[in-house]
Image (cartoon, coloured by chain):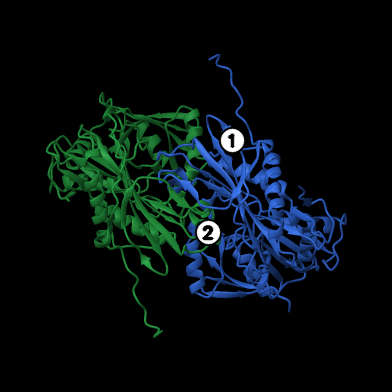
Chain colours: A green, B blue
Amino acid sequence: MTGEVVALPNIQPDRLQFIKTETPKAPPPSQSLMFGHTFTDHMLTIPWSSLEGWGVPKIEPYGPLSLEPSCTVLHYAQTIFEGMKAYRDEHGKVTLFRPDMNMKRMNTSAARIALPTFNGDAFLDLIKKLIHAERDWIPREPGHSLYIRPTMIGTQKFIGVAPPSEALLFVICSPVGPYYPDGFKPIALYGTTEYIRAAPGGTGAYKLGVNYAPGVMPQKQAAKMGYAQNLWLHGPEHYLTEVGTMNMFVVLKKNDGTIELVTPPLDGMILPGVTRDSVLALARGHASGSYKISDLPDKLVVSERPITMVEIQEAEASGALVELFGSGTAAVISPVNRIGYLGKDIHIPTGEDGMGPVSRPIWTELVGRQMGTIPSDWSVPVTA
Amino acid sequence: MTGEVVALPNIQPDRLQFIKTETPKAPPPSQSLMFGHTFTDHMLTIPWSSLEGWGVPKIEPYGPLSLEPSCTVLHYAQTIFEGMKAYRDEHGKVTLFRPDMNMKRMNTSAARIALPTFNGDAFLDLIKKLIHAERDWIPREPGHSLYIRPTMIGTQKFIGVAPPSEALLFVICSPVGPYYPDGFKPIALYGTTEYIRAAPGGTGAYKLGVNYAPGVMPQKQAAKMGYAQNLWLHGPEHYLTEVGTMNMFVVLKKNDGTIELVTPPLDGMILPGVTRDSVLALARGHASGSYKISDLPDKLVVSERPITMVEIQEAEASGALVELFGSGTAAVISPVNRIGYLGKDIHIPTGEDGMGPVSRPIWTELVGRQMGTIPSDWSVPVTA
């Protein structure tokens, strides 16, 4: 023992073991797909321990994990995840959308709850190998994709509240159809004053499992009152923060005709969403003139700033409220037509197609880039 | 189908299946026990589904759970737990301490994250059967016990954020020694202003896994600075809320010599701890004269009220700060001798034995009642 610090192994793609399933399934018909119900033939697993670092990556048959009943994730919620989509175009070319953003965020999430961090490029390399192996599971129909779910859990076998000494990183894949198969259906939100999603000093800015379980019961209560999702508010001023499990945007019309696209700033309570970032980048490119998007209003300003329910109410009253929508990997854009707030409903305009003058052209551009019909460096090819 | 509502089965102790291990282990020597590292030969499992209600309870060999990689708990932290202790006296009599409180709280926790509720008496009946089966694992040495960990996880096999359609309730048991084997060691706390444990509208009042993972990294940071645990503060006023994973108490001396025992009120951010409730009940019994505890100050008032760091600082300056301690099932009472706060250390008196004039007699009474040397209806016998 010399006392020198030896760096533990990071994720090593060249050690990959591929154990092919002996009982491959046939992918179900694309029309029958329900979000997150069907999984492909294989999964990627990479174990970690504090003594040995990242171990041998395996692509192996999809199947149950064997977890000790004492393991950390089952008691103290030591879990983080990501959501990504792989697309296949008409020529069979498979792509991911901005996967570097997911790798970066997953490392930020890991650090927040004392799970191990990792080399994002190496992990992405292995994810691509898994997707390539499962490429026949990617539906080709428009709006369809393969949903990729990287997850990391604490697997330490004792029930102390401490940084886990063991963890498991795994990836499962689920073929999914479009979120709105029959065109956009605007949803109603319940402006929630009884429960919170996040608070300053908490974990709202990280993609942790702990941000999700507490939202299920408030969502059930909202649904009972006829609202599809919670609009999460913050503080006595009722700042708008997020919508269900999505980021959110408000579109306002100013007196001089300028259109303002507003989203809450990344103040520690807001998840730095990949779709959120993409919407902002596209809108800013258009506003600056560097990349014009057809049909998007010419006089556009983009604001990351706090916005309160009072401002929404005043905008409704003055006719300045143009639209309001959620953004996320699963639904891409989710238009909102109503907010229940303190016993009254705020009504939000939507077009005949369910969308609005800002969300429509941005959605078209975004989906074009995701599906590869509009070339961009956000689309990253998956090859063997 | 007549449309009538059929009540689904609740937990049914008479359906218990007992599958004995074929490879029983020998309990390790009591001196070698580390908290939560060693588990007994058997565990209790009870499955639940939204279609069939609570299924067949099993006491079966302790071993890994087989969980689908898509299951809810691994992604969205759908987990709740309890901590209880079983004691065995010198005559071999086995008891639990106020287990009804744990059953009640576990149901409250379940409802908060849309997990199924259950008949607490029926579940407790089964827990007692498990403890009886494992009675030889309960160390007899003073301060030793069998730590019981009831846990419920969402096991639904798809990755939608929704109330789980399947769940698993399980109980594992771990023999444990005293938290402070060599006498009380007062700990230093870091008055944490960067991170929170709970916020209004959140989940701090429930025993959910989600309250624990986010505290691990702040605890690591506090440890690096030389503090054992976080003192969780709330709001710009820096109200004291909890200590690490314990409730907390402050003892103050008033001008007229009256001793005030203060703990933060159950305002939605504070876990309703069984030890917290027991400390309050004992102190109130003494203060009212209904049940006198020897050596506890005669002029005692008990306050559930908010208390700020400024009040602690002022009490230190004026000499009114008598003691400060945490309370919980694992450590029972955990004295504090120092708080790092905004760059300065607040010093808190402790006696030569590490305790103070209120914590010492209350701890003696509490442990006496737990171990059965002081008879009380808080001690509940476990029989076959």
Helix, strand, or loop for circle 1? loop
User: Which amino acid lies under the numbered mark 2 shown in the image of this protein?
Assistant: Pro
Position in image of residue B79 (x %, y %): 53, 47
Position in image of residue A203 (x %, y %): 44, 54
User: Which amino acid lies under the numbered mark 1 shown in the image of this protein?
Assistant: Gly
Position in image of residue B262 (x %, y %): 70, 60
The first of marks 2 and 1 along the sequence is: 1
Q: Which residue, as the protein is rendered here, is positioned at the far top?
A: B2
Regarding residue A342, the answer to whether it shows in the image is no
Crowding at label 1, few (<14), some or many (≥20) Cα neighbours within 10 Å? some
> Residue B55 has which mark?
1
| Chain for numbered disc 1 | B
> Residue A295 has which mark?
none
In this rendering, the answer to whether B344 lies above or below B174 is below
Position in image of residue B295 (x %, y %): 84, 68
* Residue with the mark numbered 2: B236
Residue B297: image quadrant is: bottom right
Regarding residue B121, the answer to whether it shows in the image is yes
Residue B26: image quadrant is: bottom right
Q: Which residue, as the protein is rendered here, is positioned at the far bottom?
A: A2
Residue at x 46%, y 57% (from the top left corner): A155
Q: Nearer the viewer, residue A293 or A164?
A: A164
Crowding at label 2, few (<14), some or many (≥20) Cα neighbours within 10 Å? few
Q: Nearer the viewer, residue A106 or B251?
A: A106
